[in-house]
Image (cartoon, grey):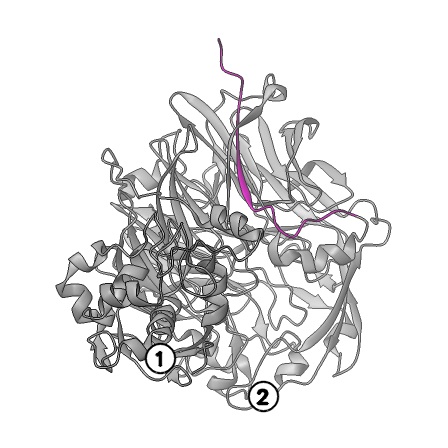
Amino acid sequence: MSSRLLFTSKAALRAILVPELILVPASTLFSVAVLAASVTTSDVNVQDVYDTHCSTCHSASLRGSAHGAALKGPAFVDKWADQPVSKLLTYLKSNMPPGQSAALTVHEHVALADFIVAANADKLVGSTLAKGSVSASKAIDSDPAANSIDLDQTTADTSNGEVQWSGADAIDQLARSAGGFQNLTIDDYRAVTSETLANPPAEDWLSWRRTLDGHAHSPLQQINRENVGGLQLRWSLSMGDGSNQGTPLVRDGVMFLTHPGNRIQAVNGATGDVLWEYQYSYPAAAKLLGGPTRNIAIYGDALFLATYDAAVVAIDARSGNELWRSEKADYREAYTHSAGPIIADGVVISGINGCEWFTEDGCFITGHDPVTGKELWRTSTLAMPGTDAYASWGDVAPDRRGGGDNWIAGSYDPKLKLFILGTSQAKPWVAVSRGMSVDDAALYTNSTLALDPHTGEIVWHYQHIPGETIDMEVGFERILADIDGNKVVLTVGKDGILWKLDRATGAFQALLETQEQNIFEELDTETGRVRYREEIRKAAIGDTFTACPGIYGGHNWQASAYDANKHRLFLPLHQLCTDMTPREVDLGPGGGGYGADSVTYPMPGKEDATGLLMAIDARDMTPLWSHEQRVIYQTGALSTDGNLVFIGDLDRYFHAYDADSGEELWSTRLAAPAHGYPISYAAGGRQFVAVQSGIGVFRALTAILYPDLYQPVGGQTLYVYELPQSP
């Protein structure tokens, strides 16, 4: 009988994952039906899982050691033969590896349970443990005491008393897996209301860009341009591997930190003490682009996470326990999330990604009930049959229409009761690759949409670049600004064009070319109408054309900040160009994709100045100052009432600039490139500034742009800074 098992589950995802087990010979496959869930496929190499997570304590032979009980032989059989396999599974899920049980998926735990049983098969014939089919869900629900079974012993329990070490690295592996951390409860947590979200306390950071209007501006001023030079590290915390593009939230001094890997921790914002941890279990195939989770939301007593596998979950903010899970789509059709929810008048609103592949439903936005998780409405970002906008796709069938993704969270105006967000371009990227021309507008892609938060109705839309054909979407942050009584939306796309729209109607007001560009031969500042240059309009399959800015910007996910007191926008930009070549794409059922080859490089004359931070007066769209540097900025901007702008970059520096002049006042160097969205908050009467590091998937670009620059693969960390405390 082989000791190497393959585990296959045909199931998907889970409100509370409770599998049914079917024990079969070790040489066969497991089939696990996950109750009340759709179907997925997950292969587990159980030998590798055991070697990585279990062998250090229990030995490679399963015979145990001084640090773990025997998992094979008389001692194991005596303890477990009369127990149902569901009880063994419950124990493994609750306790193994020590302090890190959430690091393994349910499928891996099930595979380990069978692996252990199979290793003892000749001694378990006819026993309860070896019986063929057990409902683990029923056993776990009816017998909570199963969690208390003591499998792991501090003294070896083997047949001959030997202590086994697999090698010198076993000690290191033991140190990595050891720990007894238990989740705590935040007893003094205060619920967050819609009024609190609209006007948060100065000390808190309660939404992606702090306020629902997307400003990313903190009114705190204990740290200011006079003393920022004294900033020092207060505490730091290691984070999970992946694209570390998250945004911590802070409520009453408690930070809710989102890691790559759909993991959330509650942390004491003043000390760095971890209070609780939540790990969502997802299939590996659902993870997109290194797994960025750019934001979570908070409302009432719950946090809301949009998961890799196209679901929304609610987590108890006090305890870290999962409250509900609502599946939005089937991740096997490529649906996933990179942006998280925003709370709009008590509705949990989120978009979705993965719409480069053709599906019947296409991309959409949903609203969910925060208490029950019930989906309240669903609005397609692709024009539907029977609407005037449907014809904007030409002759393309509805199930061959791609794009309209939502990569970045939206903003909410509680007075106008409008939820406002951006959609990405049509896909495949180039019009000819999708069987269209640039004259086919392809609504509602590459647009700003204003939705009724309670019905999902599109109240108005503005399409920035009709028929977009270079992967140059205007799909990023929407800043809601009130300028001398004028309610506007400000947004910037990859092409570096800053747009100003009327917030109530979507009418065009103004635009600004923040960088030199060669994409549009016409750009009407009175009407907002744009026209591609002829080479781009007429590009055929295989024709290469140049676009400056390129497909990484210009602007990208590194969001701007806005100081409403001074009507000042702080905008990160990349000074890069791209050569793009359209390719043929399968336009049949289930086809689609991106459909182009591209090469990105510095703008001519900007080889040593690819990073740009610009300050703009939003009243008249006039640039005030700019700061260039060799490498690109890799975080969003953060502004404060201390007259400061914070931002981090690829070369591991975290900077503070004078908001009036752009002069650099302070910087520090991190262990890895800065990433994500810096925030500022207060706890215990002290102001803090926090930033994350760990570049993730973006390294695929930057390693080519800056081959001489040291860019560590890992280093995902949260850093928290404060001024020196008085003695």
Residue 626 percent location from the top left of the image: 72, 37
Say whether residue 17 is visible: no
Residue 490 percent location from the top left of the image: 54, 48
Segment tinted magenta in the rendering: 709-727
Q: Are marks 2 and 1 in contact (CB under 8 Å)?
A: no
Q: Residue reaching furthest left?
A: 142
Say if 104 sits above or below 514 in the image: below
Q: Residue reaching furthest front?
A: 160
Instruction: Tell which circle, 2 or 1, labels the residue nearer the N-terminal end.
Output: 1
Q: Quote the CA–CA distance across marks 2 and 1.
A: 26 Å
397, 558: nearer the viewer:
558
Residue 130 is one of the magenta-drawn residues: no
Disc 1 is placed on an element classified as: loop
Say if 725 sits above or below 661 in the image: above
Residue 587, disc: 2
Q: Which secondary structure dominates the residues rendered in magenta?
A: loop
Total count of labels: 2
Q: How many neighbours does mark 2 have within 10 angstroms: few (below 14), some (14-19), or many (20 or more)? A: some
Which kind of residue does numbered mark 1 sit on?
Val
Which kind of residue does numbered mark 2 sit on?
Leu
Q: Which residue is mark 1?
A: 39
Q: How many neighbours does mark 1 have within 10 angstroms: few (below 14), some (14-19), or many (20 or more)? A: some
Say whether residue 172 is visible: yes
Q: Is residue 391 left or right of residue 593?
A: left
Residue 682 percent location from the top left of the image: 42, 27
Choose mark 2 or mark 1, whichever is in front. Answer: 1
Say if 203 sits above or below 110 in the image: above
Say if 390 sits above or below 502 in the image: below
